[in-house]
Amino acid sequence: MTNLGFFSSKLSMAKSLDITVIGCGRLGSILASHFSQQGHNVVIIDRDRSAFPRLAEEFSGFSITGDAAEMKVLQAAKLNKAQVAIAVTGKDNLNVMVSQLAKTVFQVPIVLTRILDPAREEIYRQLGLTTISTTKISAAAFLQTLQQQLKEKL
């Protein structure tokens, strides 16, 4: 099973969810593998076929090679049936565009958007997107760890 350390508990759902992950990089592959291993129905999209070997060996979902900016790719992924969409590509503009489509066109109830540039996060939130700034989260973790190390060692 994918070890997420701080987050190893199951999602508290009575039934399995239909989850679409956009982007099969380091983050997307971990999330998709984790959800799959929990018994959820997972579809992962990436434009680069060579990204899929990052998925856990036990991954039982579907992988779709294609550009998530294209409607036909999102339709092939049956995004309209997803209860959750998570956009975690390395491109903020693509994440935002796909998230807006998931929310407005495909009516996905829960849409999470990874944002790398924290300066843009507020703008995207004003568009009604639920954003997660991995840059801010990483900075906070470094600062917290440094503070802890200073207390322990100095």
Image (cartoon, helix red, strand yellow):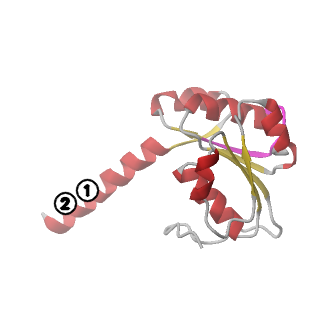
Residue at (66% x, 35% y) in the render? 129
Percent coordinates x, y for residue 43 in the rendering:
75, 53
Closer-to-camera residue (86/24) = 24
The residue that label 1 is drawn on is: 146
Residue 100 is inside the magenta segment: no
Displayed quadrant of residue 60: bottom right
Percent coordinates x, y for residue 53 in the rendering:
60, 57
Tell me where the magenta segment starts and ends, as one range.
Answer: 104-113
Residue 111 is inside the magenta segment: yes
Which amino acid lies under the numbered mark 1 shown in the image of this protein? Leu
Closer-to-camera residue (89/8) = 89
Q: Residues within 10 Å of mark 2 (few under 14, many from 20)?
A: few
Residue 44, label in figure: none
Residue at (63% x, 28% y) in the render? 126
Percent coordinates x, y for residue 35 in the rendering:
68, 63
Which amino acid lies under the numbered mark 2 shown in the image of this protein? Leu
Residue at (68% x, 70% y) in the render? 37
Q: Residues within 10 Å of mark 1 (few under 14, many from 20)?
A: few
Note whether 126 is above or below 112 in the view shown: above
Q: Is residue 101 visible?
A: yes
Q: Secondary structure at mark 2?
A: helix
Residue at (43% x, 42% y) in the render? 135
Residue closest to the far front: 50
Q: Quadrant of the C terminus?
A: bottom left
Q: Is residue 11 visible?
A: no
Percent coordinates x, y for residue 13 in the rendering:
77, 67
- How many angstroms separate mark 2 from mark 1 (CA)? 6 Å
From the viewer's perspective, is 40 left or right of 113?
A: right
From the viewer's perspective, is 98 left or right of 131?
A: right
Q: Secondary structure at mark 1?
A: helix
Displayed quadrant of residue 61: bottom right
The residue that label 2 is drawn on is: 150
